[in-house]
Image (cartoon, coloured by chain):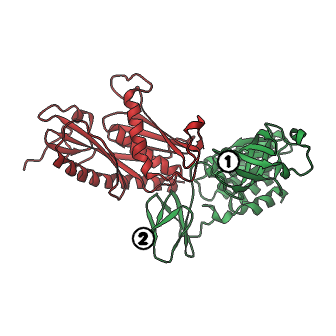
Amino acid sequence: MNELNKAHEEYEDFSSYPDSGTESATRTVVVPGEIIASGEDLLPGEGTRRDGNDVIASRFGLAEKVGRVVKIISISGAFVPRRNNVVIGRVSDIVHSGWIIDIDYAQNGFLPLMESPRFINKHEMDQFLAIGDMVSAKVWSVSPKSIDLAMKGKGLGKLEGGFTFRVNPSSVPRVIGREGSMINLIKENTGCNVTIGQNGWVWIKGQDLDNEIKARKAIEFIAEKFHVSGLTEKMEEWFAKNK
Amino acid sequence: MVVFKRLDGRKSEEMRPITAKVGIIPNADGSAMFSFGKTIAIAAVYGPRLLHPQHMQDPQSAVLRVNYDLLSFSVSDRKKPGPSRRSQEISKVTSWALTPALDLKEFPNTVVDVQIYILQADASTRVAGINAASMALAHAGIPMKNLVCAVAIGKLDKELVVDVDKNEEDFKEGEAATDFPIAKLANSNSYTLLQMDGNIQPNVVSKAIALADKACEKIYEVQKKALKEVVESQ
């Protein structure tokens, strides 16, 4: 296991992904306005609201009951940043106190100057990150005013070499797989370094272009067919076929 | 009482066959198709995303921007493509019909774009568009109070009918045809669209609304089923 795997495990709560808990039978698909459960002692969590005795869905997704808390796991739609998400973004501007990062959301992310791993002269900020550079970063805080990013951590930082491409953000959990099983499978079979941002951007860097392309094809295959169950086994077959 | 016979043989409370499908446009954040018989509407939702020009931004919530378009091939006489007075009006009333169902406070300064295209028009296009848009918004994960269901009630001479088609819209006998599109929040008494084109007596309006309530219950079930199917097929 390389550092990036560890980074994924540290930052992401895999237990909250739709595919990771196939055993739990308490997950049901709900549409907005649907009553999920009734009871005075239930606590409405993310994506739900209380109306009298009922807990009602405010959005489309998988409803889950953990103890007394009822919440909705989102399964579709645009990427909305949350604290601790790993994202891959592009430097779109340099301002006096940091970098503006385009993270594929309505608001740009802000990476403060303090996040650079070494001392940087304010007048030479493009020595470290220039406009157009790609970075992987962690969402530190989300507020209506700004989305602050952090870059201190394993697997985070400027992305040098390799290439980036985009998949549908809602298929990212499947590409990572349960406890990172899918992404590890791809890494083992191609020998590439792979970082996946929750915003759907993927960065691949390997020994040679052939392996990089293979890794990309594998990820795109999963992103397209993310509705198939037992995908890890399918991918093992896929790699056996595409040796 | 003589049972009123409609031009296509439907009963007065009978809708045309309804079909709905979610997730039809891969590049959109949410998408859906809805059809009443030959009327087919598709809707795509993009966002929340950055809103430009900046002066349109609302610092307290996202802005809903709806665009309704009757495609040039959707009618038998080719329609001149592009925006028209009619399409602008329908875009506006659709946006008003959907806004009360949405909770956009989470996304200040952004826009949620809804594109509605009518692929095939056989009357009731605005209500088909609203039904499709409501499913597409849910599919895009936009927080909502409830789905929006819409249906057009018609009055042919003195007879109320549910889900008007083109032949009925052109009905000329007696008091002629009245088109009465209605949209409401599902399972509630909140109406978000009430339009009327023609003549109708005040005491008939409540009957028309009661018919719409019944039809909307059926439409809601179809919408709900389509949304759930998109996950189960995954």
B110 left or right of A153 in image: left
Nearest to the observer: residue A223 or residue B171: B171
Q: Is residue A184 left or right of residue B112?
A: right
Q: Which residue is mark 1?
A: A200
Q: Secondary structure at mark 1?
A: loop
The chain in red: B
- Locate residue A69 relative to residue B179 in the image: left or right: right
Residue type at tag 2: Gly
Is the residue A116 above or below the residue B173 in the image? below
Q: Nearer the viewer, mark 1 or mark 2?
A: 2
Snapshot quadrant of residue B89: top left
- Residue flagged by tag 1: what amino acid is it? Gly
Decide: few, some or many residues near mark 2? Use Cα within 10 Å; few <14, some 14-19, many ≥20: few
- Specify the label residue A52 is tagged with: 2
Identified at 32% across, 40% down, the residue is B37
Please provide percent x and percent y for residue A228. 59, 54
Q: Earlier in the sequence, mark 1 or mark 2?
A: 2
Could you say where residue A128 lies in the image, as x and y percent from the top left?
88, 42
Q: Nearer the viewer, residue A178 or A186?
A: A178
Chain displayed in green: A
Tag 2 secondary structure: loop
Can residue A64 be seen by looking at this rendering?
A: yes
Quarter of the image containing the N terminus of chain A?
Answer: bottom right
Q: CA distance from mark 1 to mark 2?
A: 38 Å
Residue B18: where, in percent of width, then height? 34, 46
